[in-house]
Image (cartoon, rainbow, N blue to C red):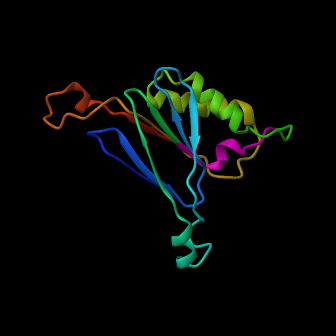
Amino acid sequence: MFFGLLDKHTGKFEYASAGHNPLVKLDGRTGRAELTKTKGFPLGMVPPEQFNRRIECAEISLAENDWLIQFTDGINEAINQEGEEFGMERFVDMLQTAHHLNPPDLISQVIAEHKLFTGNTEQFDDITLLAMKWIGIADDTGNNEKSKLSNAGKI
């Protein structure tokens, strides 16, 4: 499980992960990827007191046009007909290349390339990809065009 909270007024993102994949932060200017992971056991795997001692929270600050990408291991652990794993390196390379797109298009492009890679190989795990592009500080007055934009895509 992954939990995150974004302060739409500052761009500060606080998060914790209970055994989930790393969070990918893409620099909005360069596309450079940074993977961050917090400590935590998967939910239900250990007694609550052990879980509570291990769980770790972290925070990052987003600059305008930075991305946060979260995904399940059905993406990076998928295999093709030759038994080759899709892998983190390939996945991160795709994200870096597509960082100039909007969230729905980035997701569509990555999923399409993932399907090309796996071909007719049977899917053995869930595939979830969440992409959020920070477009800047929110204006709650409703007068700002940014307040009308959708900045998240999910598949």
At 72% from the left and 44% from the top, the residue drawn is 78
At 59% from the left and 22% from the top, the residue drawn is 97
At 67% from the left and 52% from the top, the residue drawn is 125
Count every numbered label the image shows and give the total: 0
Question: Splitting the image into 4 quarters, where does residue 65 fall?
Answer: top left
Where in the figure is residue 139, as x and y percent of width and height?
A: 19, 34
79 is within the stretch colored magenta = yes
33 is within the stretch colored magenta = no
Q: Nearer the viewer, residue 81 or 102?
A: 102
Question: Splitting the image into 4 quarters, where does residue 152 fall?
Answer: top left
Q: Nearer the viewer, residue 132 or 17?
A: 17
Question: Splitting the image into 4 quarters, where does residue 121 fall?
Answer: top right
At 59% from the left and 55% from the top, the residue drawn is 20
Where in the figure is residue 37, as x and y percent of width and height?
A: 57, 49
Where in the figure is residue 127, as x and y percent of width and height?
A: 60, 46
- Part of the protein shown in magenta: 70-80
Q: Residue furthest right?
A: 82
Left or right placement of residue 122 versus residue 142 in this view: right
Left or right placement of residue 22 versus residue 86 in this view: left
Where in the figure is residue 105, as x and y percent of width and height?
A: 49, 27
